[in-house]
Image (cartoon, rainbow, N blue to C red):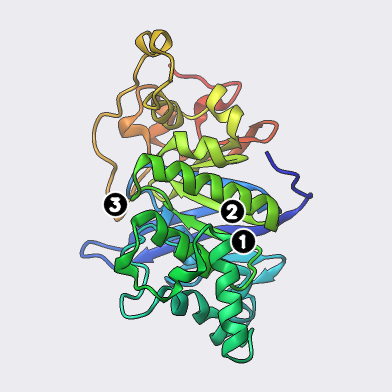
Amino acid sequence: MSDATPGPLLVVEALHVHFPGATGPVKAVDGVSFAVRRGETLGLVGESGSGKSTTARAIVGLVPVTAGRVFLDGHDLADRRVLKAMRPRLQMVFQDPYASLNPRMTAGAIVGEPLLVHRRVAGRGALDAAVCRLFETVGLDPSMRRRYPHEFSGGQRQRIGLARALALEPAVVLLDEPVSALDVSVQAQVLNLLEDLRRTLGLTYLFIAHNLGVVRHVSDRIAVMYLGRIVEIAASETLFARPMHPYTEALLSAVPVPDPEVEAHRTRIPLDGEIPSPSATIVGCPFRSRCRKAFDRCATEAPALVEHRPEQWAACHLAEPDAVTR
């Protein structure tokens, strides 16, 4: 989809985010590693509670990292001074367009605030001109900048959040379920806008969602998360055509196909049971209690995330060529 240049722009290495719990640490993110290449969109998918949003918040420094490292263009963001210096290049758009905007500020003040904080403009005239340009960039009439958030629709509010994220000309934008709270017709508009901005501004996206149909539409590659871990990473079309992990297969089986004849003959793969508690001590594969293909080895040995095919990584014993299931 993109004309990405070689080399990753954002690198996440063995990221852990643990929170204190009544029975032990809650492992919201448990050893996540991935890289986002320059100019591409990496989709991050999984069920609710899989750790997608916590991963994004840890990357931008909104939640403390228990272990692991994050690099932006080679700079280690564990150093708070480095993170502060690199903050303009790493921005985030949040899921809820109703909760992510200050109701006491006008839309123009919200969009212009990053420019003031980082001293990117001098004088009211320059600030107002910059805000007007940002409104136009995301498809909003600049005359609306004096309105308050409650005077906008959900789609318009998400555009305001996007304009705020673009104010500092970032290199990477983390999009946390950016369309899940919007009507379907509005979702398409926002997705098309995001793709246009990626091309015209040379942006790199980490796109978080639970809707695989949406992720397929916008992503170059897709990473699948389960219980705080990455279980598969592959190019978007490869993942949909030849998934390697049973969890990915189950997720894809639930994605509707816009062909009644094909849809009528598809087999759904049910995911029985509940996701194990992130505070539980898990031996073996964390997915085995819900996996219809689990065998003896799955109960004793946790599979590593390994490149089994070119550019396709999976954490599953069944993906190994010499897998013995009986």
N-terminal of the pair, mark 1 or mark 2, is 1
- Looking at the picture, tell me which residue is in the foreground, 139 or 35: 139
N-terminal of the pair, mark 2 or mark 3, is 2
Q: What is the C-alpha distance between the residues marked 2 and 3?
A: 32 Å
Vertical placement of residue 204 versus 223, above or below: below
Q: Position of residue 251 (x, y in %)?
A: 40, 31
Q: Which residue is mark 2?
A: 205
Could you tell whether 103 is left or right of 231 in the image?
A: left
Residue at the location (51% across, 50% down)? Answer: 207
Which secondary structure lies at badge 3?
loop
Label 2 crowd bin: few (<14), some (14–19), many (20+), radius 10 Å: many
Q: What type is the residue that disc 1 sits on?
A: Val
Determine the residue located farthest toward the front in the rendered image.
Answer: 143
Could you tell whether 218 is left or right of 291 in the image?
A: right
Looking at the image, do the residues carrying marks 1 and 2 touch, with CB atoms under 8 Å apart? yes
Q: What type is the residue that disc 3 sits on?
A: Ala
Image disc number at residue 280: 3
Q: Position of residue 125 (x, y in %)?
A: 60, 86
Could you tell whether 38 is left or right of 57 in the image?
A: right
Q: What is the C-alpha distance between the residues marked 1 and 2?
A: 6 Å
Where does the N terminus fall, quadrant-wise? top right
Residue at the location (24% across, 33% down)? Answer: 273
Which secondary structure lies at badge 1?
strand
Q: Which residue is mark 1?
A: 172
